Image (cartoon, helix red, strand yellow):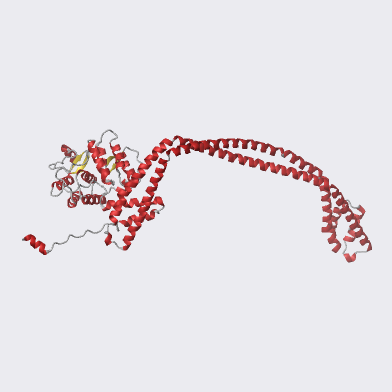
Amino acid sequence: DLAQKQGQADLPRLGEQPSRNMSSYYQTIEGVSCDRAIIEACSKAVRGQGDGRVSLDDAKLVFEKVKDAGKVTKAEVWTVRYCLTEFNFTEAACDWITEAVSSMTQWDSKDFAKETTNVSHYEQVDGVQCDHGIIEACRKAVKGAGDGRVSKDDAKAVLAEALDGGKVTDKEKWTLRLCLSEFNWTQAAHDWIIDELKAAGAPIKRPAGGAARGPAPKKAKVVDGISGKLKSIEKALKIAEKKDVPADVTALLGSMLAHCLSIYKDERHQFQSDVVEMASNVLAESQSALEADVAKAQELVNGGDGEKDRREKAVAEAEAAYTACQEDAKAKEEDKKAKAEAHKATVAPLKAAKEVQKTGDVEGVALEKEKGALQSAVESDLSPMKEAGGKQRQLERFSKALTRAGLDESLIKCVHLPLGKAPDQRGVFDGVVLKSLEEAIAEKLAQLSGEIEAFGPAKDERAAKVKDAQEAHDAANAASDSAVEALAEAKKAEEAAKEAAAAAQKSAKSLVSDLANAAKSLDEAKDALSTFQSGPLAAFNELKDRVAPQPEAEESADVLAAEQQ
C-alpha cells in the first residue's frame, strides 16, 4: 500500500515515459499497480542502439526483472501486458517473453479461454477486475469459424463492448491489453482496433516516433511467427471434422505438425513429409467444408423468391392437411360411438341364448349323467366282480348304483349271490342271475341312449344359437376396440397436422428475417473461407515449402586483395 501511495505522486499518462527518479518499487498506471523496474528496462531498451524496438536480448534482461524475487507476481504479469502494448517488441522478443512469463505464472491461460457462467459485468483476472463483455467477445471470436484468431469483424464487436458506455474506462483499457496479449489477432484486426481506440481518445499504443527504424514492429500476439502459424493450422484441421474426418485424426496431426513444419522441406525425414502430406489432405477437406458452407448459404440467398413461393405453398398444404385431419377425427369419433352401441346391443341376445340353452338342456344333461353313472358302475364294479368275486363293500356300492338307475328291486337283492362268489364256486342259479342282470343293464342303457338322442336336435339348435350370438358379440367388441384405436390415431394425426400448420405459418412469417440471416451467414461463411485461405492455409503452404536459406558466397581472395589496393 505504501508503495502505491508513493507511486501515485507521479502517475504517468499512457504514452508518457514513466519517471525513473521515483524510489518506489511500484507505480500505479490507470489504477493498476505496475513493476517500475520492468517498465524502465523496456524504456531503456527502446532508447538504446537498434531500431527502437525491444530485442530478444533486451527481453531477456526484462525477464530478469520479472523473476527478480524468484517467482512471477500478478503485478509483474500485468506489467508485462502493459509493456507489450506500450512498447514495440521484435517478433522473437514478444514470443519469447510472453511464453516465458506464461510458463511461470500461476494464472492458467487455458482456463481463461473457457466459457464462464459468471453473470457479473466484471470478472477477476490476476487480481484485477476486467470487463466481462470484452473478454467474452474475444472468447466467442476465437471459438467461431475460422483459424482461431480475432478477425477484423470480431474486433468491431470487441470495440463495441469497450465503447458501450460512450468512452473507454481504465478497466476497459486494461481488459483490452489483456485480450491483445492473451488472444491471437489477425494483423488487420490488431491494427484496426489500435487505430480506432486512438481515434476515440483512448490510445493504448505508444507512437513509434522518429527513433523507430527498419521493418514495422510486431503487434501484441499477432500470429506471424511459426508458433502462432502452427496453432492456427492445428485449429484449421478441426474444420475437417465437418467432413467426417475423426477428431482423433485431426488432433493427432495437429500435435505432430510442430515436429514437421518447423523443419525445412529439404531436411525432413520421409515420415515427416508423409505427415505434412496427410495434413495437406485434411486441410483440403477443411476447405471443402467451408466451401460447402458458402454454397449452402449462397443457394438460400439466391432462392429468395422461390423460397417465398415454397413457404406459401407449404402453408396452404399444411392447412388443408390439418382440415382433413380434423374431419377424419370427427368421423372416427362418430364411428366409435356407433360401434360401441352395436357392441352393447349384442349383450342381451347372447345372455338370452345362454339362458334358453341352460334351461332346455337340463333334462338331457340329467339323462347323460345317469347313463354315465351306470356305465361307470359296470366298468368299475360289475366287471371286476364277475372275474374274481366281490367283497361286501363293493357289492353294496354296486347295488346302490343299480337302485339309482331304476333296475328291478328283486334283481338287485339277488346280485350278491353270484357276485359274492368266485367264478368256480357259482352254480346254475348264479348264472341265471348274472344273465338277467346284464340284460337288465343293457336294456336300461339302451333306453337312456334313446331318450338322450331324442333331445339331440333341440340341444344342437340351442347350442347353434348361442354360438351365433357369441360370434356376433365378439365381432362387435373387436369392431368397437378398433374404432377406439382408430380415433386415437386420428387425434394424434390431427395434433401433428396442427403443429405442422403452425410451423409452416411461422416459417412464412419469418422469411424476411431468415433471408437476412442467410445473407449474414453467407458473409460469415465467405469470411471464414477467406480467413482460412489467407491465414492457416497460406501459412501451411508457406511452411510446407520452406527451404533452408543459402549461405552467402564467400568472396574470393583475389577480390579481397583488389579491394585492399
Question: Residue 409, image x and y in percent?
Answer: 91, 52
Answer left or right for 280 relative to 431.
Answer: left
Extreme residue in the bottom direction: 424
Q: Is residue 131 visible?
A: no
Out of 15 and 18, give the one closest to the viewer. Answer: 15
Residue 55 visible in the picture = yes
Residue 370 percent across, percent down from the top left: 83, 51
Q: Nearer the viewer, residue 267 or 395?
A: 267
Residue drawn at point x = 46 percent, y = 36 percent? 508
* Quarter location, residue 261: bottom left
Query: Up-down: is 441 above or below 294?
Result: below
Q: Is residue 542 left or right of residue 503?
A: left
State the residue in front, 158 or 464: 158
Q: Position of residue 546 (x, y in %)?
A: 26, 57
Q: Is residue 409 left or right of residue 352?
A: right
In the displayed orientation, state which residue is furthest to the left: 565
Number of numbered markers: 0
The quadrant of the picture occupied by the C terminus is: bottom left
The N terminus is located in which quarter? top left
Q: What residue is drawn where x is 28% and y is 51%?
A: 228
The percent coordinates of residue 339 (x first, y second) are 67, 38
Extreme residue toward the top, this view: 166
Give the residue displayed 13% in from the left and 63% down from the top.
Answer: 556
In terms of image quadrants, where is residue 434? bottom right
Closest to the observer: 270 or 99?
Answer: 270
16 relative position to 168: left or right: left
